[in-house]
Image (spheres, grey):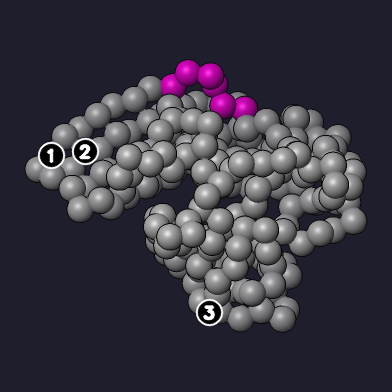
Amino acid sequence: SRALSLIVDGKEMFSSGAGFIFDNYRYIENDKNDRPVPVYDNGLEPVGTLAVEKGNGFVTVVTMRKGSLADQEISYTAHSAGVVDVNVVIRPHSGHLYRTGVSCNLDGRYENVSYYAYGPLENYSDRMSGVMLGRFTQTVDQMLYPYVKPQTTGNHEGAREVALLDAAGKGFMIGMDGNCAFTALRYTDEELMNAQHQWELPASDR
């Protein structure tokens, strides 16, 4: 019950079969890495369920996956016009949740990010000084702030719209309701957690 592939005009959008999946962790420098569950483990069971419904001009795929921290339900409705509605429901049943969201790996060629959210500096729910709501354009590499100890960075609150585009201006757009935040980085939270210096971050094509 994890999206493995999204092909548009013959091009794969996801990288390494890593579509949307529940993510429970953001690494910040003062974390002691001593949480009662592994810090990068979302607790999801390895196997879930999948159901498909076809209608007039659309196909809906509903995925369900239970977990020790929360259950994940993600439905994908693909319309003939090329729009895919993604609805994510996370049902928590544990006190060990640190955030609720989904992550995915996208092909590295979508390195240009145009977004309507708080920016252009990174910002968080408890750190909003010096930013404003507006439309901004950056590259993925520009969204990484080089903290001495690598950690989560580049977050943007109040996201309404995020477009990820390649050099030719092709890609895709994600629309949200404004109560979401997003990050676009070349590294996972686990990779940021394990690196002691910026130069130790692994090469990435996602």
Q: Position of residue 196 (x, y in %)?
A: 90, 43
Q: Position of residue 44 (x, y in %)?
A: 56, 26
Helix, strand or loop under label 1: loop
The residue wearing badge 2 is: 59
Kind of residue at disc 2? Val
Q: Is residue 171 above or below residue 77?
A: below
- Could you tell me which residue is drawn at 53 percent across and 19 percent down? 46
- Could you tell me which residue is drawn at 49 percent across and 30 percent down? 17
Q: Which mark is residue 55?
A: 1
Kind of residue at disc 3? Gly
Q: Position of residue 130 (x, y in %)?
A: 72, 81
The residue wearing badge 3 is: 134
Q: Nearer the viewer, residue 40 or 36?
A: 40
> Does 24 sit left or right of 12 as displayed?
right
Residues packed near mark 1 inside 10 Å, few (<14), some (14 to 19) or many (20 plus): few
Kind of residue at disc 1? Gly
- Could you tell me which residue is drawn at 24 percent across and 29 percent down? 52
Which contiguous range is marked in magenta? 43-48
Number of marks: 3
Helix, strand or loop under label 2: strand
In the image, which is nearer the foreground, mark 3 or mark 1? Answer: 3
Image quadrant where one finds the C terminus? top right
Residue farthest top in this picture: 47
Tell which circle, 3 or 2, labels the residue nearer the N-terminal end.
2
Q: Is residue 173 above or below residue 10?
A: below
